[in-house]
Image (cartoon, rainbow, N blue to C red):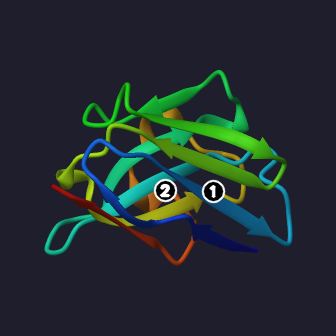
Amino acid sequence: VQLQAYGGGLVQSGGSLRLSCVASGRTFRRSTVAWFRQAPGQERQFVAAIFRWNSSRTYYADSVKGRFTISRDTDNTASLQMTGLRPDDTAVYFCAADSEGRMILSSVRDPSAYNFWGQGTLVTVSS
């Protein structure tokens, strides 16, 4: 299974971007799919997740709540719609998934709970 993240780019403050995460070799089925981000010199940070591929169970970091929306597009594609972007949203964004579909809710924000990762896509927000 491979994950590919794409859609990053350069955008002005207040602008929007849509990131996509595509799984090859399988569908997401019951997987929890998440987005994390990592800015230079900082630890990887949770952004958003769909718990066990259930659209009614989405979770967000406080810093992006109300601005970002994670969604299921197809059986093997998840997206992150980002609006109201700010310079502090600048980071490499990674999508991740747990292949076994056994994620527990308390681990959704923990990057070590995910065993598949995409290669990352850079989002740069200029002021």
Q: Which residue is mark 2?
A: 113
Question: Where is residue 118, by image quadrant?
Answer: bottom right
> Which residue is painted at 60% across and 36% down in the image?
51
Q: Position of residue 57 (x, y in %)?
A: 60, 25
- Image quarter in which the C terminus is found: bottom left
Q: Nearer the viewer, residue 95 or 73?
A: 73
For marks 1 and 2 on the same chain, the one whose residue lies earlier in the sequence: 1
Q: Nearer the viewer, residue 106 or 44?
A: 44
Q: CA distance from mark 1 to mark 2?
A: 7 Å
Secondary structure of the residue carrying tag 1 is: loop
Q: Which label belongs to residue 11? A: none
| Three-letter code, disc 1 | Asp
Q: Position of residue 73 (x, y in %)?
A: 75, 44
> Which residue is painted at 71% across and 39% down in the image?
53
> Which residue is painted at 27% across and 31% down in the image?
62
Q: Residue furthest top?
A: 56
Q: Residues within 10 Å of mark 1 (few under 14, many from 20)?
A: many
> Which residue is painted at 64% across and 60% down in the image?
21
- Image quarter in which the N terminus is found: bottom right
Question: Where is residue 41, by image quadrant?
Answer: bottom left
Q: Which residue is mark 1?
A: 98
Residue 108 visible here: no
Query: Relative to residue 91, is residue 1 drawn left or right?
Result: right
Q: Position of residue 95 (x, y in %)?
A: 53, 61
Query: Relative to residue 120, is residue 1 drawn left or right?
Result: right
Secondary structure of the residue carrying tag 2 is: helix
Q: Nearer the viewer, residue 31 or 70?
A: 70
Q: Position of residue 110 (x, y in %)?
A: 39, 51
| Labelled pair 1, 2 in contact (Cβ < 8 Å) | yes
| Three-letter code, disc 2 | Ala
Vertical order, 8 against 56 (above or below): below
